[in-house]
Structures are given as C-alpha cells and as structure tokens.
Amino acid sequence: MIFCKKCGSLMKLKKENGKNSFLCGCGYKTKDLGDKKIVESITETKPPEIVEQEVVALPVVDADCTKCSNKKAYFWTIQTRASDEPETKFYRCVKCKHTWRDYS
Ligand SMILES: [Zn+2]
Ligand SMILES: [Zn+2]
C-alpha cells in the first residue's frame, strides 16, 4: 500500500496510458512506477527456536554457559512440531545473554 507523502492518506492505483501511478484525493500523484512491482512488506515469520524478546519473568536455573562459563541461566521450554514430541528446553545466560537449547 502506498500512502500520500503530502497528506498521509491511502492512495489509489491509477493506470494512465498503460503506466501505473498513484493518485491521492488531495491531488498528490506519484511518479510513474513503470513496470516495477509494488512490493508490500512481508511479515517475516520468526524462527521458533530462539526467542528474541526480553526475558524477565523466566525462572533462573543452574546451567553452564558455553560462552562465558556463567553458572546461571534463564530457563524456558517451547513445544515444537507435533504435540507428542517432548518440548525443547532453552537456556539464556543471565550474564552474557547467550541462548542455547538443551538436546538431552
Ligand atoms: Zn494526499
Ligand atoms: Zn554467558
């Protein structure tokens, strides 16, 4: 979707002499876009393994960080794929924020 640079409202696609341009109610018009396709922003699907959000309310357990050798890490689990599979354990070092998963 294209928004007007002048007034901020949604612009309408208009075909003029076989060329695409966007027209706004306020009179603002984009330049000819040629044959370029209008790329809409695709919402990226986040990988299920590593949670990038800030972990605050997670329990802290004893775990050896492979990066800084710290002994304490946040701990959480994520159910992956089929529900009959065991959930994957995750740790995040409280010191260096290094995140790893427990395969055991
Ligand atoms: Zn406008
Ligand atoms: Zn660490």
Image (cartoon, rainbow, N blue to C red):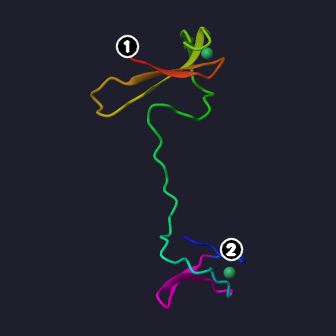
* Residue behind mark 1: 104
In the figure, residue 84 lies in which quadrant?
top left
Farthest right residue? 6
Quadrant of residue 103 within the rendered picture? top left
- Of labels 1 and 2, earlier in sequence is 2
User: Image point 62% across, 80% down: which residue?
Assistant: 31
Q: What span is colored magenta in the figure?
A: 10-26
Work out whether residue 7 can be spotted.
yes
| Amino acid type of the residue tagged 1 in the rendering | Ser
Q: Position of residue 27 (x, y in %)?
A: 67, 88
Tell me if mark 1 has few (under 14), some (14-19) or many (20+) residues whose alpha carbon lies within 10 angstroms of its own.
Answer: few
* Residue 29 x %, y %: 64, 83
Looking at this view, is 104 or 87 the one in front? 104
Q: Is residue 99 magenta?
A: no
Please tell me which residue is depicted at 36% across the width and 31% down the height of the picture: 80
Question: Is residue 85 positioned above or below 10 on the image?
Answer: above
**In this orientation, does residue 13 appear?**
no
Please give the residue where the numbered disc 2 appears in the rendered image. Answer: 8
Q: Residue 55's spot in the image, x, y percent?
A: 60, 29
Q: Position of residue 99 (x, y in %)?
A: 54, 23
Label 1 sits on a secondary structure element that is loop
Q: Quadrant of the N terminus?
A: bottom right
